[in-house]
Amino acid sequence: MIRIGHGYDVHKLAEGRRLVLGGVEIPYEKGLLGHSDADVLAHAVADALLGALALPDIGRRFPDKDPKYKDANSILLLKDVYSEILSTGYSVCNLDCTVIAENPMLKPFIERMRAVLADALSTDISNVNVKATTEEGLGLRGEGIGAHAVVLLEK
């Protein structure tokens, strides 16, 4: 039995924040604004996992009004989500992600993102793909970063 899920997240860039994508800290003059570390890639993956099994999204699971999630490490939140997925008998078959960012250049960090996500999902890195693209000055216009994730779960 297989299930497919899609996740999407976007956060605004802001001064005085760390930029974390896929659990990897990326040197940049701005970071993503959010209650947790605002890792849009980890959030999109978590929502894809939850969506595949028709479970409530991460906004309901980890509400931004709850102080215990303030500055939370999103990879730890992703691991929490994945433990629930595993408890249902499902596991990741493969994961495909796209990060949308005008800047910074993400190519040097892609393989590390893949490794961190593979580790969080207890799967081989060959089952995890991360791509980066710009919107050619359209869409987010450098004001934020977004991510899409599609996951295939198998039982």
Image: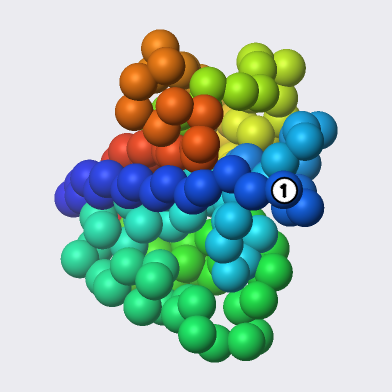
Q: In this figure, what is the number of numbered marks?
A: 1
Q: Can residue 98 be seen in the rendering of this structure?
A: yes
Residue 16 position in % (x across, y down): 77, 53
Q: Give the residue type that dot 1 points to.
A: Glu
Determine the secondary structure under disc 1. strand
Q: Is residue 56 left or right of residue 116?
A: left
Residue 46 position in % (x across, y down): 43, 56
Q: Can residue 97 be seen in the rendering of this structure?
A: no
Which residue shows up at 52% across the image and 29% down it?
Answer: 142
Question: Is residue 66 depicted above or below 129 in this figure?
Answer: below
Q: Is residue 32 left or right of residue 5?
A: right
Which residue shows up at 62% across the image and 87% down it?
Answer: 67
Residue 94 falls in image quadrant: top left
Q: Nearer the viewer, residue 138 or 23?
A: 138
Which residue shows up at 27% across the image and 45% down it?
Answer: 6
Residue 92 position in % (x across, y down): 41, 46
Q: Residue furthest top?
A: 136
Q: In the rendered view of the protein, which quadrant contains the C terminus?
A: bottom left
Image coloring type = rainbow
Q: Nearer the viewer, residue 98 or 55?
A: 98
Question: Is residue 152 depicted above or below 58 in this figure?
Answer: above
Question: Is residue 73 depicted above or below 103 in this figure?
Answer: below
Q: Residue furthest right?
A: 27
Which residue shows up at 44% across the image and 39% down it?
Answer: 146
Residue 112 position in % (x across, y down): 72, 30
- Count residues near mark 1 (Cα–Cα under 10 Å), then give few for <14, some for 14-19, many for 20+: few
Question: Is residue 138 depicted above or below 155 in this figure?
Answer: above
Q: Nearer the viewer, residue 59 or 18?
A: 18
Question: Which residue, given by chain and number where applicable, does mark 1 sit on?
Answer: 15
